[in-house]
Image (spheres, rainbow, N blue to C red):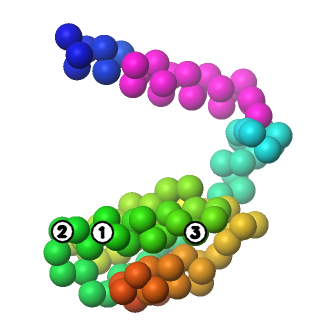
Amino acid sequence: MKKMMLMGLAVLAICGGGVALALGTSTPDGRSAQVAAAAERQATFAIENMTCATCPITIRKAMEGVAGVSAVSVDFAAKTARVTYDPRRTNAARIAAASTNAGYPARAVGN
């Protein structure tokens, strides 16, 4: 029963987000959701020193801690991270530095 309720809530949340985007609703800072999404960029980083399954957690948290980063996905097998960020608030060098400072040297690679 709990699973059904959780799945229903997840579907509702996903559909509601789609409706909000379609209606052009505003983000908390007053920009339309469509403009906010269009302003974001993605970058891929090669990550060094990943040796175990918990390393990606540390890397993700370090990169998410950079102001302007909205999403981080770390691929342990490929030794890469894919980051979505607002270029008006941060850049690839700052994101790479956050990972490097956490002990996992990162460098931006072709996107």
Tell me, yes or no, whether the highlighted magenta stretch contains residue 69: no
Q: Which residue is mark 1?
A: 56
Which three-letter amino acid code belongs to the residue tagged 2? Ala
Is the residue under label 1 in contact with that under label 2 (CB below 8 Å)? Answer: yes
Quarter of the figure with residue 10: top left
Q: Which residue is mark 2?
A: 53
Which three-letter amino acid code belongs to the residue tagged 1? Pro
Secondary structure of residue under mark 1: helix
**97 shown above or below 80:** below
Rounded to the nearest angstrom, the CA distance separating label 3 from label 1 is 16 Å
The boundaries of the magenta stretch are 9-26
In this view of the protein, which residue sits in the foreground, 55 or 109?
Answer: 55
Give coordinates of residue 61: x percent, y percent: 42, 65
Q: Answer whether residue 62 is visible to the viewer in this image.
A: yes
Q: Which residue is mark 3?
A: 66
Q: Answer whether residue 82 is visible to the viewer in this image.
A: no
In this view of the protein, which residue sits in the foreground, 59 or 106?
Answer: 59
How many numbered marks, from 0 up? 3
